[in-house]
Amino acid sequence: MLTKIMDAFPSQRGLVIGTTETSLACGLIFGSSLSIQLVTRFAFYLPFLIIGCLHLAMIPIANWVASRWKRQYSKLDVDMEIVPVATLLKTPHVMLPIISNFFANFTLGSLFALIEYRSLQLDLSPTTFTLFFVFFGMTTLVFRPLGGIICDTDPPTPIYWNLFFDFGGIIGFLLIGPISHLCIGAKDWLFVCSTLFFGLLNCCLIATCSRAQHGVALASLHMNELVSQRVQ
């Protein structure tokens, strides 16, 4: 469905995916807040039950929206060229964002773990701890569409700059994160930086791919998220 939306706006592919993926931020903001409130007021298992039921309820709604979209934009249906994964990975504009996106996910996952560990040390309340996830969601709402706009510029933003900024954030995290005596406020800035790089790279990968490569590119993004989370 996302590829259909990008095909409708070929000159603004970066902005389209950046704006679409803000749904992740909205889910993080409302989901974490709702879960904390349910846990503190009711039983521990209740958030999983309620949120799981909401997710199941969204499946028929999503199918209904997708079917309407297909009827409305059927003129966009063309035979998609099947691009071999090996050929796609040989392209620097694809391979570099994939590698960098892996480390961006790795950085964010490690940062989540550190913040959780530090909050336990400081004996923060559940409400205060939720603010970190709300903060991440709010910055994502801003930076992901911004990353899409940057990627849609003419001439396009070189992928190497995004790679440079991402690894710069990772190096800063590795230097500052392990220092145990840092106050939790110092990690907030790392939170902002990691979110910015992550949003830029997600948009950049799709913006630099041709239409025939959209499916593989989107699959690569999700594969990176799963693998990097397991490794960290």
Image (cartoon, helix red, strand yellow):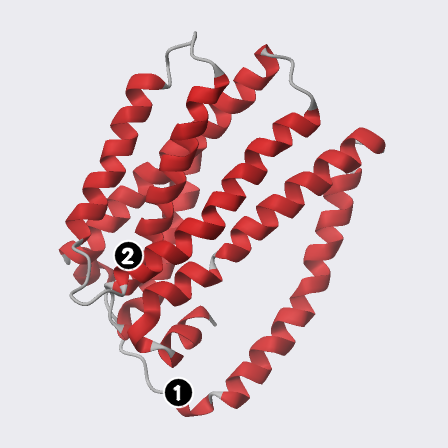
Residue ID for mark 1: 76
Give residue 44's position: percent from left, percent from top: 78, 31
Give residue 66's position: percent from left, percent from top: 56, 77
Give residue 52's position: percent from left, percent from top: 71, 50
User: Which residue sits at x=25%, y=44%?
Assistant: 99
Q: Could you say whether the residue bearing mark 1 is in a helix, strand or loop?
A: helix
User: Which residue sits at x=23%, y=47%?
Assistant: 162
Work out whether residue 84 can be spotted: yes
Q: Could you say whether the residue bearing mark 2 is in a helix, strand or loop?
A: helix
Give residue 204's mark.
2
Q: Residues within 10 Å of mark 1 (few under 14, many from 20)?
A: few
Q: Residue furthest bottom?
A: 75
Relative height, residue 58 to residue 31 (above, below): below
Give residue 205's mark.
none
Residue 132 located left or right of residue 64: left
> Given the image, on which type of amino acid does mark 2 rest?
Cys
The part of the image, by quadrant, that contains residue 155 is bottom left
Residue 87 located left or right of residue 132: left
